């Protein structure tokens, strides 16, 4: 039977990042600033590495290429790139110490046609923490034309069109491809997305990097894919916690690319929570709080805040113990 294993992330040092992923999630990664950790990734721009079990030290994409059955039988788990070791999803932690650039992602169709067959990017954010008065950009307040946007960029007045909304811990946001968006300073999120690294920056506050250079913008492509119509402020979805002994869970989001749940484990000595994946899809457990253990057969994985566990499809039955909160992702 297939067994779960820990992953070690790839790290990104984007200029807007902070220190919280090291300070609070014990990543122990010698990168400053530490903006993102790609916890479960087979993307060529940042591949996760197996950190427990028989395959310790192997890049995740190489392992998946050898065991494509671990992805399951879901249509997304059998798309062409899976045979090359590519997962359909990418899972990250993001620490926005400063505002991210205002950006937009293309659809699958646009990316396939204009970016050498790559995937587009739809993503979901689960807010792990947000400082007082923190917010994000979600779409536009008013419908505008491409000429309006270009003029606003030339005059430095784009922000008058941006819809800024407040953010609180435990919020969920679905960012469809084509939505103009930006995570604001002071927000810490778990991001679940398509397996893509296509981002078109529209505006970056005229910032410069460590070498004194402004980051590249992609205005023309951004305007080809962006939704320039006014958008309603997103409302938080109705979420219902379902309880059973030692565990509660709730659906955070379901779309054609992924399903995401929050799972809360709180066991006493005599309580037992069992867990396994079916043959339809692999699952990824991202520990966002607490600690505990995952045991199966004669093995135990100790789990702490910040850890990421890959669970192959049709896995062995596992026993979960401790006080832990997971984000549970499947395709």
Image: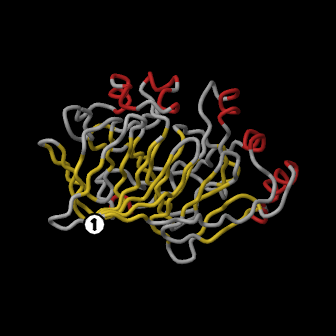
> Where does the image place residue 307, in percent across and percent down from the top left?
31, 52
> Where does the image place residue 74, in percent across and percent down from the top left?
48, 33
Question: Residue placed farthest to the bottom in the image?
Answer: 132
Is 192 in front, or is 136? 192
Location of the N terminus (image quadrant): top left
Vertical relation: 127 (above or below) 133: above
| Residue pictured at 74% horizontal, 63% vertical | 232
Vertical relation: 102 (above or below) 167: above
Q: Label 1: which residue?
A: 266
Q: Secondary structure at mark 1?
A: strand
Question: Residue placed farthest to the left in the image?
Answer: 298
> Where does the image place residue 68, in percent across and percent down from the top left?
38, 25
> Where does the image place residue 152, in percent across and percent down from the top left?
82, 57
Is 218 in front, or is 280? 280
Q: What kind of colouring is applied to the model shown?
A: secondary structure
Q: Is residue 132 left or right of residue 322?
A: right
| Residue pictured at 20% horizontal, 48% vertical | 301
Q: Residues within 10 Å of mark 1 (few under 14, many from 20)?
A: many
């Amino acid at each position: 039977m297939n067994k779960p294993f820990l992953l070690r992330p790839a790290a990104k040092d984007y200029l807007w990042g902070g220190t919280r992923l090291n300070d609070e999630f014990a990543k122990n990664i010698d990168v400053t600033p530490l903006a993102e950790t790609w916890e479960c990734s087979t993307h060529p721009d940042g591949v996760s590495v197996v950190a427990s079990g028989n395959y310790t030290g192997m890049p995740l994409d190489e392992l998946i290429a050898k065991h494509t059955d671990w992805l399951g039988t879901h249509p997304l788990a059998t798309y062409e790139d899976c045979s090359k070791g590519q997962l359909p999803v990418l899972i990250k932690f993001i620490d926005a110490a400063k505002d991210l650039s205002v950006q937009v992602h293309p659809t699958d169709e646009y990316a396939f046609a204009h970016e050498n067959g790559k995937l587009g990017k739809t993503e979901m954010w689960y807010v792990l923490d947000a400082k007082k008065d923190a917010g994000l950009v979600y779409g536009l307040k008013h419908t505008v034309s491409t000429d309006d946007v270009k003029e606003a960029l030339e005059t430095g007045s784009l922000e008058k069109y941006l819809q800024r909304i407040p953010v609180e811990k435990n919020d969920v946001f679905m960012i469809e491809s084509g939505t103009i968006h930006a995570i604001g300073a002071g927000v810490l999120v778990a991001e679940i997305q398509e397996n893509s690294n296509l981002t078109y920056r529209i505006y970056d506050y005229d910032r410069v990097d460590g070498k004194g250079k402004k980051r590249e913008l992609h205005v023309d492509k951004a305007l080809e894919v962006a939704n320039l119509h006014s958008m309603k402020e997103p409302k938080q979805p109705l979420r219902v916690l379902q309880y059973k002994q030692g565990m509660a869970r709730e659906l955070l989001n379901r779309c054609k690319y992924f399903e995401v749940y929050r799972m809360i484990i709180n066991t006493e000595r005599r309580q037992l929570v069992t867990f396994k994946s079916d043959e339809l899809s692999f699952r990824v457990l991202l520990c966002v709080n607490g600690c505990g253990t995952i045991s199966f057969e004669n093995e135990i994985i100790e789990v702490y805040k910040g850890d990421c566990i890959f669970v192959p499809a049709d896995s062995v039955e596992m026993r979960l113990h401790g006080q832990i909160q997971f984000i549970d992702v499947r395709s």
